Amino acid sequence: MDRSTPVPTATPYGTLPPASPMASRKPISLPRLHDLRARGEKITMLTAYDATFAAVADAAGVECILVGDSLGMVCQGLSSTVGVTLETMRYHTESVVRGLHRVQGTAWVVADLPFGSYHESPEQAFRSASVLMQAGAHMVKLEGGGWTTDTVRFLVERGIPVCAHLGLTPQTVHALGGYRVQGRDEAAAQQLRRDALALQDAGAALMVLEMVPVAVSRDITEAMPRCHTIGIGAGNGTAGQVLVMHDMLGIHLGKNPKFVHNFMAEAGDVRAAMAAFVHAVKSGSFPDNALHAWA
Ligand code: KIV
């Protein structure tokens, strides 16, 4: 019998194809993300919370999968991300990572540290981050600037890659007074810039910029060669783009924010919709500043 040819096994319940013996693409790593930025190619990121969607996103060419605490809203039906626990994040991170292993996926997996899991001290953040890294994440994400800088440095020095998150930070939605654009006046924009540069100096390698005016996110991106901005509602001047998977597939319980585009409407199936997102980001057609961003 020829053992080099995998025998396709029928898998029930719409689960994943059997793992192929050889990965056809090289795994995404921090150096590869730096290379993308260096050659001016946009970085793509989508959220995923389970094995199958993660595998499909990977197959569609998405470079980074975010196990976002937005799962609290889209999977658990919570009214904000504040109620998401570390145990829930561990469970979903493990599911995503298992899905990727199953198909020899290559995506870089970022997992959100949930509210309350990193706020006390850098040591608490390290313990929480260890749970997500041991679940298979490659990087953890945490929200906020200023007070988080020491925590980011503490994690990076101990070998944990960190994605920062500035602008609209959903875990502090109650303090911010709602889901509003951040950094609109000059003082707030300057504060965002200072926070971003301090986080880059502390070693953050990626930074989500959410609901920030186009000029502010462009300026921050240009000022940070070592930390790559991933925008959501921040215009087309960032190093990459992220969307919540349910939003870009047109599955939502309320009204979508203006920065979302429904890629499913024209695509017909989930993999094609994700591939269309990748193509639109890389070609520069998404986001369109006139439609999906704020001046
Ligand atoms: O939790 C999440 O999905 C996020 C994205 C909105 C960037 O943080």
Image (cartoon, helix red, strand yellow):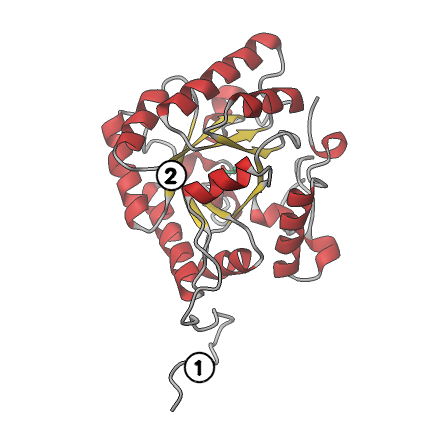
Residue pointed to by mark 2:
140
Instruction: Depth check: give the residue in front, 204 or 73.
Output: 204
Horizontal side of residue 60 vs 174, given as left or right: right
Q: Residue at x 39, y 56 (%)?
A: 97
The residue that appears at 45% across and 56% down in the rendered structure is: 26
> Which circle, 1 or 2, is nearer the viewer?
1
Q: How many marks?
A: 2
Q: Examine the image and state in which quarter residue 115 appears.
A: top left
Towards the viewer: 210 or 230:
230
173 to 112, vertically: above or below: above
Residue 148 placed where, x, y %?
Answer: 36, 23
Neighbor class of circle 2 (other Cα within 10 Å; few <14, some 14-19, many 20+) is many
Give the percent coordinates (x, y) of residue 55: 49, 60
Determine whether, in the image, residue 36 is placed left or right of residue 200.
right
Mark 2 is on which residue type? Val
Q: Secondary structure at mark 1?
A: loop
- For the residue pair 219 and 289, the one nearer the viewer reads as 219
Residue 248 is tagged as: none
Which residue lies at the image location 40% right of the left edge and 72% below the top edge?
A: 21
Mark 1 to mark 2 CA distance (whole Å) = 37 Å
Q: Which residue is mark 1?
A: 5
The answer to whether residue 31 shows anywhere in this view is yes
Q: Is residue 181 visible?
A: no
Q: Amino acid at mark 1?
A: Thr
The quadrant in which residue 257 appears is top right
Disc 2 element: strand
The residue sitting at 56% across, 54% down in the picture is 61
Please identify the residue farthest to the bottom as the structure is shown. 1
Q: Residues within 10 Å of mark 1 (few under 14, many from 20)?
A: few
Looking at the rendered image, the quarter that the N terminus falls into is: bottom left
Quadrant of the snapshot with the C terminus: top right
